[in-house]
Amino acid sequence: MITAGINEDWAVLQSMFPPNWRALAKDTGSLTRKLRSFKTEEEVMRTLLLHVANGYSLRETVTRAKLSGLAEVTDVALLKRLQCSEEWFKSLCMSLLKERGINIEKSVHNNVQMRVVDGTVVKEPGKTGSEWRVHYSIRLPDLSCDYFKLTATKGTLTGESFKQYPVKQGECIIGDRAYSTVQGIAYLESKKAYSLVRVNTGALPLFNLNEESKFDLLKTILELQEEFSTKECSVRLKVDENSWINGRLCIIRKSKTAIELALKKLKREASKRQSELKPATIEFAKYIILFTTLPMNEFSTHDVLEWYRLRWQIELVFKRLKSLTAFGHLPKYDDVSARSWLYGKLFIGLLTEKLIISARDFSPWGYYL
């Protein structure tokens, strides 16, 4: 009876897989080692998911696989199988993401596709555990994930930047202060895409529209003293000696409560660093300051502020994946198996989300035939 229940649960889970999941095992080269101790691709996947989804060690996984009649395999052989499965898990994830991205019209405003990008760091357990950065993109407002990738956390081309993402003409990419750089915004401009980014006042030099003089941001925000008051200003960025990017600032003063929380956080961080806060830093903390290249005649200040307000939802996606799949902990193996394990975790997270969404449409007997 226990085996029957396990098999039934597997049938439900398998119904959520991409239709070509078995073919992807061969197409991605994950079965270059052939099946060997496994009889089918299904046994390979079930054993890998024992390790990835449940967090069992390799040794515990092979013991459970043997007791359940799945396969008789050594922990070393399973590790090698995991290493070969990186592209398989990645392709499975991309297939599920593609399924979720079919309703494009819901996330389009004035024929502009809104996308939010962000990154998070995950670390292997232990003092010597390596770190990875996950770069992640979702579409608004339907929260369909359309891209992700893994990089190291140190070295060139590893930091949070708009350059980490493929971009199409006419899209608007929304990022937080980590993406507030001239180089990143220029990359979007070269792709004929729009940018909407929260200004990092220490990293994004602003210039007056028709001059080479610096824009006085502090003087501008001091004109807004009532909570929720807004202001828009035309500015430009200097890419090089002969190239400029025209844009505008959309500014809103925070509520009194939000200001108190922001200042409290700043003071706490300054205390840890044993440094004093600059007066300008205190003033900037009272406002949300956005830079965008979206056309003024199609996107009002209110529109820009509202789209950025939705940006926080991508953080909820990360938190959900971490809570559902222990996404914040990598196994302490080599880089290849760690990446494969990460893609496996993302696969489980996306399957879970698909199960939740599909539950609203389940037939009375459980799942689709």
Image: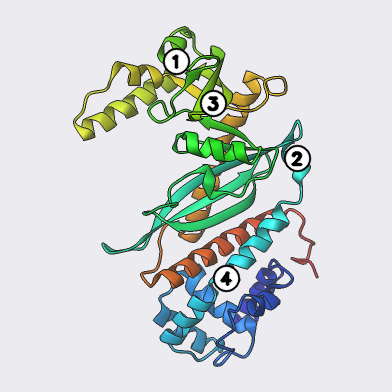
Q: Quadrant of the N terminus?
A: bottom right
> Dot 3 corresponds to which residue?
291
Count of number-bearing discs:
4
> Dot 1 corresponds to which residue?
213
For marks 1 and 4, give the CA distance: 50 Å
- Residue at 21% in and 28% down: 275
Q: Amino acid at mark 3?
A: Phe
Residue 276 is at least partly visible in this image? yes
Looking at marks 1 and 4 on the same chain, the residue that comes earlier in the sequence is marked by: 4
The x and y percentages for residue 103 are 76, 47
Q: Is residue 69 left or right of residue 79?
A: right
Q: Is residue 272 left or right of residue 8?
A: left
For mark 3, give the secondary structure: strand
Q: Amino acid at mark 1?
A: Ser
- Residue at 52% in and 18% down: 251
- Residue at 41% in and 69% down: 335
For marks 2 and 4, give the CA distance: 31 Å
The residue closer to the viewer here, 27 or 212, is: 212
> Dot 4 corresponds to which residue?
87
Crowdedness of circle 3 by 10 Å Cα count: few (<14), some, many (20+)? many
Mark 2 vs mark 4, foreground winner is 4
Looking at marks 1 and 3 on the same chain, the residue that comes earlier in the sequence is marked by: 1
For mark 1, give the secondary structure: loop
Crowdedness of circle 1 by 10 Å Cα count: few (<14), some, many (20+)? few
Residue 323 is at least partly visible in this image? no
Numbered badge on residue 106: 2
Crowdedness of circle 2 by 10 Å Cα count: few (<14), some, many (20+)? few
Mark 3 vs mark 2, foreground winner is 3
For marks 1 and 3, give the CA distance: 18 Å
Q: Is residue 146 left or right of residue 80?
A: right
Q: Are marks 3 and 2 in contact (CB under 8 Å)?
A: no
Q: Is residue 58 left or right of residue 10?
A: left
